[in-house]
Image (tube, grey):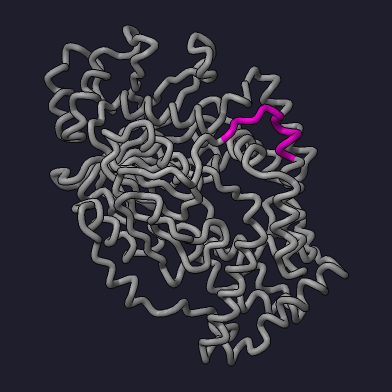
């Protein structure tokens, strides 16, 4: 923890220099002045003790982690009203900081960036740069939390309504948790840390935020790295069924082209179609797969589960084996998938905030799409995927119940950036497959990892090297031979141990 006592000013100033280098001015000013003299238009970070889990991480990886809170208005139209406290963490660079700091904007919306600190430390991406994490308003360790613990236990509309009513009774203005407000929060963070130059890495929903921030602070944002990007103006809900069909078809084609996979699963697509039909006729119940409820799986639920697997680098290789097992009535694969399920450990709190998801995403989606657009998209699909479109319609219904006040996304795909941009995507991404993304930046490169789904960076050493090369010299195309030379995904074979 930083020292706040004026009597030890020299000592803590030296500490600031040792930990943050070029950010010394911002942080030391914050620590000397505190928050008492802050003006409403001058956002200031209050540095606090880090959670015990972070201290453990720092010892394991010989890293320096500092934590703070940034206070911002909950309602940006009423600055004198309630405040939101954003949790901020910084991993200090191990080298002499040849690169500007990298600001990480997590996905969701609702994912807690701080929950992924251990993964970033393990990747060693803080070697040449400080890495800044911020839990977006309503998520992770930020306060107030819009998490819905009861909804974690069982996903149904009644529990979602209970969560909404509880948050409203606590005086939380759900309409204030929008992408516009979150973007203003990030701008305040960059201002409070006095970052004259900063790189941004956005993942999934975080790519939208990165795009927005770059629009507002083009003079400060040096480069963008957008991983699993779906850009402002696009509807994630509308694309659920088409993207899932596209990605599963790639699995079927790639398994068919792989002699080992084809030998193990020679009728993969036919077995998939049979499994969906059988589950629709007679849903199954799996105990122990959900935290505190029995999983009731029909054909639509099976499609949803496969969509989750397509996005997850750990479970993606198991898709052919899982489809075949379910088609044969063998449910032992569920236990294996449960072991592989990716769960973040943030020590206390929750890695995903359902309330922020509903408040931020729903407002944009209800403005970006419509029932008719989703139905039209469904009409172009194979009939087996149509239920996923109905699932999207149900989500729109939940959105209408959660918050009827809409926030239109004022950026469109006609927007261009004068910021060098690196687009990363996975071949099997069912959420945001690559489609001409580099055309939206005056200086952009787009690369696809042939083995991954949604989110590439933390699952691929190759992608990490490409990003570091890009950050080191964004004026030229980064070397990416490792992506071109990668072998196709090796699917799990059921006889494998």
Q: Nearer the viewer, residue 321 or 208?
A: 208
**Is residue 67 a member of the stretch shown in magenta?**
no
Q: Is residue 480 visible?
A: yes
Q: Is residue 429 left or right of residue 332?
A: left
Q: Is residue 497 visible?
A: no
Q: Nearer the viewer, residue 51 or 130?
A: 130
Q: Is residue 281 left or right of residue 475?
A: right
Q: Quadrant of residue 152?
A: top right
Q: Quadrant of residue 51?
A: top left
Q: Quadrant of residue 370?
A: top right
Q: Nearer the viewer, residue 152 or 197?
A: 197
Can you say whether 416 is above or below 180 in the image? below
- As drawn, the residue found furthest toward the right would be 281
Q: Position of residue 194 (x, y in %)?
A: 25, 26
Q: Quadrant of the N terminus?
A: top left
Can you say whether 395 is above or below 334 in the image? above
Can you say whether 50 is above or below 342 in the image? above
Q: Residue at x 35, y 43 (%)?
A: 417
The residues colored magenta run: 398-408
Q: Residue at x 48, y 12 (%)?
A: 79
Q: Residue at x 38, y 43 (%)?
A: 104
Q: Position of residue 345 (x, y in %)?
A: 49, 47
Q: Position of residue 335 (x, y in %)?
A: 65, 67
Q: Nearer the viewer, residue 419 or 222?
A: 419
Q: Residue at x 50, y 42 (%)?
A: 412
């Amino acid at each position: 923890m930083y020292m706040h006592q004026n009597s030890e000013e020299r000592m803590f100033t030296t500490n600031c220099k040792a930990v943050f280098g070029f950010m010394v001015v911002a942080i030391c000013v914050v620590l000397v002045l505190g928050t008492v003299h802050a003006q409403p238009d001058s956002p200031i970070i209050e540095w606090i003790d880090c959670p015990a889990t972070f201290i453990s991480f720092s010892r394991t990886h010989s890293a320096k982690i500092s934590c703070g809170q940034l206070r911002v208005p909950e309602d940006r139209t009423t600055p004198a009203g309630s405040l939101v406290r954003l949790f901020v963490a910084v991993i200090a660079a191990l080298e002499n900081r040849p690169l500007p700091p990298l600001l990480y904007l997590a996905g969701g919306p609702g994912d807690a960036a701080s929950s992924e600190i251990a993964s970033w430390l393990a990747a060693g991406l803080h070697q040449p740069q400080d890495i800044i994490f911020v839990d977006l308003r309503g998520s992770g360790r930020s306060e107030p939390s819009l998490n819905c613990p009861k909804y974690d236990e069982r996903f149904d509309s009644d529990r979602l309504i209970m969560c909404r009513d509880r948050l409203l009774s606590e005086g939380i203005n759900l309409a204030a948790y929008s992408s516009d407000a979150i973007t203003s929060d990030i701008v305040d963070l960059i201002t409070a840390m006095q970052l004259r130059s900063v790189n941004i890495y956005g993942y999934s929903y975080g790519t939208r935020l990165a795009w927005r921030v770059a629009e507002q602070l083009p003079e400060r944002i040096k480069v963008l790295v957008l991983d699993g990007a779906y850009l402002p103006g696009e509807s994630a809900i509308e694309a659920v069924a088409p993207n899932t069909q596209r990605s599963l078809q790639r699995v079927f084609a790639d398994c068919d082209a792989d002699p080992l996979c084809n030998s193990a699963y020679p009728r993969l697509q036919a077995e998939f179609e049979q499994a969906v039909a059988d589950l629709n006729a007679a849903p199954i119940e799996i105990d122990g797969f959900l935290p505190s409820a029995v999983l009731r799986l029909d054909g639509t639920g099976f499609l949803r589960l496969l969509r989750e697997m397509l996005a997850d680098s750990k479970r993606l290789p198991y898709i052919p084996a899982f489809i075949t097992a379910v088609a044969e009535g063998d449910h032992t694969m569920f236990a294996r998938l449960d072991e592989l399920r990716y769960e973040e450990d943030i020590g206390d709190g929750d890695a995903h905030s359902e309330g922020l998801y509903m408040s931020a995403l729903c407002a944009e989606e209800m403005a970006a799409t419509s029932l008719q657009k989703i139905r039209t998209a469904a009409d172009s699909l194979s009939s087996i995927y149509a239920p996923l479109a109905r699932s999207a319609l149900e989500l729109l219904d939940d959105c209408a119940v959660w918050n009827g006040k809409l926030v239109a996304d004022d950026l469109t795909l006609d927007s261009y950036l004068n910021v060098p941009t690196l687009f990363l995507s996975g071949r099997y991404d069912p959420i945001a497959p690559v489609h001409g993304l580099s055309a939206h930046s005056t200086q952009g490169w787009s690369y696809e990892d042939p083995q991954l789904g949604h989110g590439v960076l933390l699952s691929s050493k190759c992608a990490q090297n490409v990003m570091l090369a890009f950050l080191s010299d964004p004026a030229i195309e980064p070397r990416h031979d490792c992506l071109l030379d990668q072998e196709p995904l090796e699917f799990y074979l059921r006889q494998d141990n």
